Image: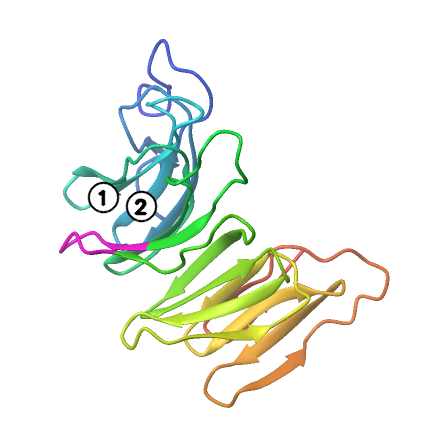
Amino acid sequence: DENVRPPSGGTGTQVFYMYLGGPGPFLLSGSSYRQFGPRVSGSRVVYCDQRHGSANQDIYVVDLASGAEQPVSTEPGEQIMPDIDGDWVVFVDNRDYVLGRPRVNDIFAKNVVTGELRRLTSDSGSVHQDSPRISGSRVVWHEWKSDNIILCDLDSGEQRQIASGTGASLDIEGDIVVWVQGGEVHLYDISTGISQQVSGNGDALVYHPAVSAGHIVWT
């Protein structure tokens, strides 16, 4: 099927999409280079692309309604781990990395309609940030140095720590943030400030919690 065959001469994985109950799957982009890490919000899909080299991964967004593709970030270094909600994309960016020095991973947010770019963290390399997730105006991410989860409100600019001693696997929807800590899934309610453990798996390994419409799932 010409809809699912990767472009000739391509290298690596491709991103596909389909409409539930409709046609597909279809290739998202005409780029023949490796694509990965897609996230979707409405008709927009954001993903990583290696068209500028495996050491210079960039982030692009495609609007399925129009078919238009646009770069979110093509700065030097790696831009990875994107997430999207509405007009805002958040991602990890190490544009300030200098060879021979500690790698700097910071969190950025970009409005794909207005083009506004915000740098949410600015660290010297002693702190790594990863796994950003966004819901509305709220962004959460994992901070490697102390294994903290940081919550940022794009409207107010306020940032605060909501958990410590956590893993990098997390998600957010509305007031609810979920993550893995001590081998169990935990929850934080932004509206009440209350945290609680929501799984009881004993010695079982827990990964990849996700939250949507009042439901939490994990593996």
Horizontal side of 217 relative to 94 (left or right) equals right
Res. 18 in view: no
Classed neighbour count for the residue bearing mark 1: other residues with Cα under 10 Å, few (<14), some (14–19), many (≥20): some
Foreground pick, 5 / 201: 201
Q: Residue furthest top?
A: 9
Instruction: Name the amino acid, label 2.
Output: Val
Task: Please tell me whether mark 2 or mark 1 is closer to you in this view.
Answer: 2
Q: Which image quarter holds the N terminus?
A: top left
Does the rendering let one see residue 84? Answer: yes
Picture disc at residue 189: none
Q: Residue furthest right?
A: 203
Of labels 2 and 1, earlier in sequence is 2
Span of residues in magenta: 109-117
**Residue type highlighted by circle 1:** Leu
**126 inside magenta stretch:** no
Residue 109, percent from left and from top: 31, 56
Q: Quadrant of residue 53?
A: top left
Q: Residues within 10 Å of mark 2 (few under 14, many from 20)?
A: many
Read off the residue under disc 1.
64
Quarter of the image for residue 98 reads top left
Quadrant (top left, top right, bottom left, bottom right) of the C terminus = bottom right
Q: Residue at x 35, y 51 (%)?
A: 40
Between marks 2 and 1, how big is the CA–CA gap?
7 Å
Image location of residue 91, percent across then percent down: 39, 50
Question: Picture coordinates of residue 16 (x, y %)?
Answer: 38, 34
Which residue in the structure is indicated by mark 2?
Answer: 45
- Asked if the residue under mark 1 is in contact with the one under mark 2, i.e. CB atoms within 8 Å, the reply is yes
Task: Check the image and report above or below for 29 versus 108.
Answer: above
Q: Is residue 115 magenta?
A: yes
Left or right of residue 63: residue 107: right
Which residue occupies 57% across, 69% down?
Answer: 178
Badge 2 marks a residue whose secondary structure is strand
